[in-house]
Image (cartoon, rainbow, N blue to C red):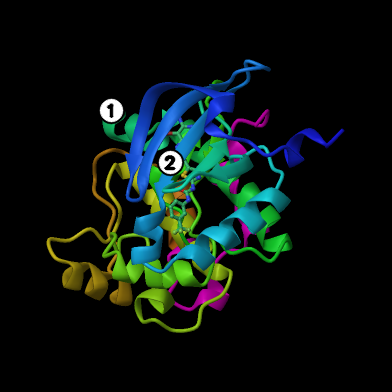
Amino acid sequence: TEAPNKKQWSLQDFEIGKPLGKGKFGRVYLAREAKSKYIVALKVIFKEQIEKYKIQHQLKREMEIQTSLRHPNILRLYGWFHDSERIFLILEFAHGGELYGELRKRGFLPENKAATYIMSLAQALAYCHEKHVIHRDIKPENLLLDHEGRLKIADFGWSVQSRSKRLTMCGTLDYLAPEMVENKAHDYAVDNWTLGILCYEFLYGVPPFEAESQSDTFRRIMKVDLSFPSTPCVSTEAKDLILRLLVKDSSKRLSLQKITEHPWIIKNADPTE
Ligand SMILES: Nc1ncnc(NCCc2cnc(NC(=O)Nc3cccc(C(F)(F)F)c3)s2)c1Br
């Protein structure tokens, strides 16, 4: 008999539930595998969309990368299948939904939650970097929460192409590091920059370089035009961590290891995470 994860899945194997969300390339549904009753999230991607944007290789790369990653803070991709016009990704279901929703609902996060999320991200990214995977696409929409509120990094343009995807997809520039915005060769440190952006956004509710137009955001990123509003009140240690991450020279950004050892993280992150 075949190992379970080598099974050829098909739509008939699943009972489809409510829609969980819709992405650029298709919707996500709650689903249950009929025999095992196992709950999953099923992402439906239309082939003609993939062909239109010529990102087949990117999806292929995502599958390769994803099946090799196992980490408590990375959403699992259990497998995939396709029919004549769609590709289906069989994903771990994150019961808590998108972290984005929590941030929008609360406006901004308490320091212990923000620190716990940043620590989980630093640990997951350190794991990815050990596996020579740079994420490049970390933003609140791609961060999900499981039933215990544990952070899961999801969605994958995990490849060099993801930069072209982002720039051609005219996604938000808010999370792009200077070297990416300048379309320069970049390395692992882009994810460290993004952790600085996210830490700021978790604590203030908006990304640090938000501006009316993309060109203004571009200018603010290139200048590292960073300022801290007087409200909400944020600790000096949190601002210290943000200032050590939002550094233009990528070689001078705090390392992932050093992030997990930063006083603000030690003091505020939930150690059981
Ligand atoms: N509560 C929830 N529980 C679990 N999941 C949820 N949402 C799905 C999160 C995702 C995880 N992985 C993804 N991957 C892709 O979308 N890949 C993708 C799609 C199109 C094109 C391409 C490419 F061609 F550009 F690469 C790559 S979406 C939710 Br809401």
- The 10 Å Cα crowd at callout 2, few under 14, some 14 to 19, many 20 or more, is many
Query: How many numbered badges does the structure rendering display?
Result: 2
Residue appearing at x 39%, y 64% in the figure: 51
Q: Mark 1 — residue?
A: 105
Please tell me which residue is depicted at 39% across the width and 45% down the height of the picture: 140
Determine if the magenta segment contains residue 49: no
Answer left or right for 218 relative to 268: left
Q: Is residue 32 visible?
A: yes
Residue situated furthest right in the rendering: 1
User: What amino acid is found at the position of numbered circle 1 in the picture?
Assistant: Lys
Residue 258 colored in magenta in the image:
yes
Mark 2–mark 1 distance (CA, rounded to whole Å): 27 Å
Amino acid type shown at disc 2: Val
Instruction: Kindly give the residue lying farthest to the left in the view shown.
Output: 212
Residue 195 location in percent, x, y? 48, 55
What crowding class fits label 1: few (fewer than 14 Cα within 10 Å), some (14-19), or many (20 or more)? few
| Residue assigned mark 2 | 44
Considering the numbered disc 1 on the image, is that residue within a helix, a strand or a loop? helix
Which residues, given as a range, are shown in magenta? 244-273
Nearest to the observer: residue 49 or residue 154? 49
Residue pictured at 19% horizontal, 68% vertical: 214
Image vertical order of residue 154 relative to residue 137, above or below: above
Comes first in the chain, label 2 or label 1: 2
Q: Residue furthest bottom?
A: 184
